[in-house]
Amino acid sequence: MKTFFVINLCLWFRTPAESFLPVFPSIPSHSQGMPKKDTNHVRCHRLNGCFALSLQSEDGDSSDDQVASRIRSTFSDVWPFAISTFIANNYFRGCWPVALTEVPFTTLNFVHAVSGMLFAGCIITTTVLEWMVVESGSVPTQRLWFEKVPVVEEWIVLPALTGSIVSGIGNACIRYGSFQMAPFHVQSTLLLLLAFGLWWGFTDRPTQLKAQSALENSLGEKRPTIYQLRRISNVVSCLFLFAIYGMMIFKPGVY
């Protein structure tokens, strides 16, 4: 179990290369041939020893969408590390935070059930919908789909997955004294969930940008190869979910 946590922290939670790009990429100046109308000026001001970055656009365009997109991307990158720290603390150091054990058991069960329903339901539903979108062959529909899928993950899937993990570990602390003392099926469910996270992190999220790029550069190709790779990734993700629910329902070693 300890080895698995170490591997998970080293591999799953690596930051994609594009996350190191600045929020506002450098833009050529007028002397380099860039039309004045589309030029954005990035100004840095030193305030109390810190740099504040502001963007001003000569044509009045707002940069709110860029900032919001970068914030969501940063949250998605930080979230796995935060939830992994929570899991590791509860396994190696006991129940944390202690206040979690003060939450009524029935409340934790309710949160666990609703969160699991939303999490698994979104994964399976988006798998089916993406299949239908790709089969439709409609470029505008596909473009809209790959723009909105990250939003669904950030506003529904990640919060639901967080609620499921936190409430599940809280239940284990109340019932068994600590997560480390939980029976085989409880710990195995977590291992499957982490394995799902590894698979999802390495195959689903990175291919979203590649699918968007392939769509714009397909030059009439009906179905870019990356779509098929995403289909395989989504099907395997669903199989992980079936295994997780099977472990929770059948409880091997108990019945």
Image (cartoon, rainbow, N blue to C red):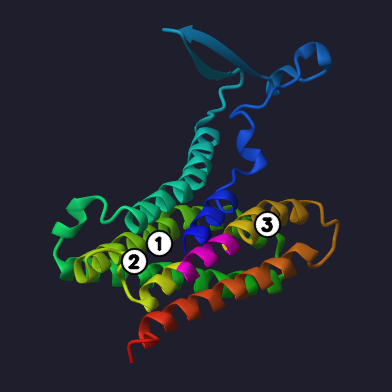
Check the image and report above or below for 170 versus 192. above
Alpha carbon distance from label 2 to label 1: 6 Å
Q: Amino acid at mark 1?
A: Leu
Alpha carbon distance from label 3 to label 2: 26 Å
Nearer to us of marks 1 and 3 is: 1
Q: Secondary structure at mark 2?
A: helix
Residue 72 picture location, percent across and down: 49, 43
Q: Quadrant of residue 92?
A: bottom left
Q: Is residue 174 shown left or right of residue 58?
A: left
Q: Quadrant of residue 38?
A: top right
Magenta segment's dominant SS is helix
Question: Residue placed at 43% from the left, 52% from the top?
Answer: 84
Closer to the N terminus: mark 2 or mark 1?
Answer: 2
Tell whether label 1 touches label 2 (CB within 8 Å).
Answer: yes
Foreground: 26 or 101? 101
Residue that badge 1 annotates: 161
Residue that badge 2 annotates: 115
In the image, the segment drawn in magenta is: 191-199
Q: Amino acid at mark 2?
A: Ser
Q: Amino acid at mark 3?
A: Thr
Q: Residues within 10 Å of mark 1 (few under 14, many from 20)?
A: many
Which quadrant holds the C terminus?
bottom left
Residue 60 picture location, percent across and down: 56, 22
Closer to the N terminus: mark 3 or mark 2?
Answer: 2
Residue 9 picture location, percent across and down: 52, 51
Q: In the rendering, which numbered label is found on residue 207?
A: 3
Residue furthest bottom as drawn: 255
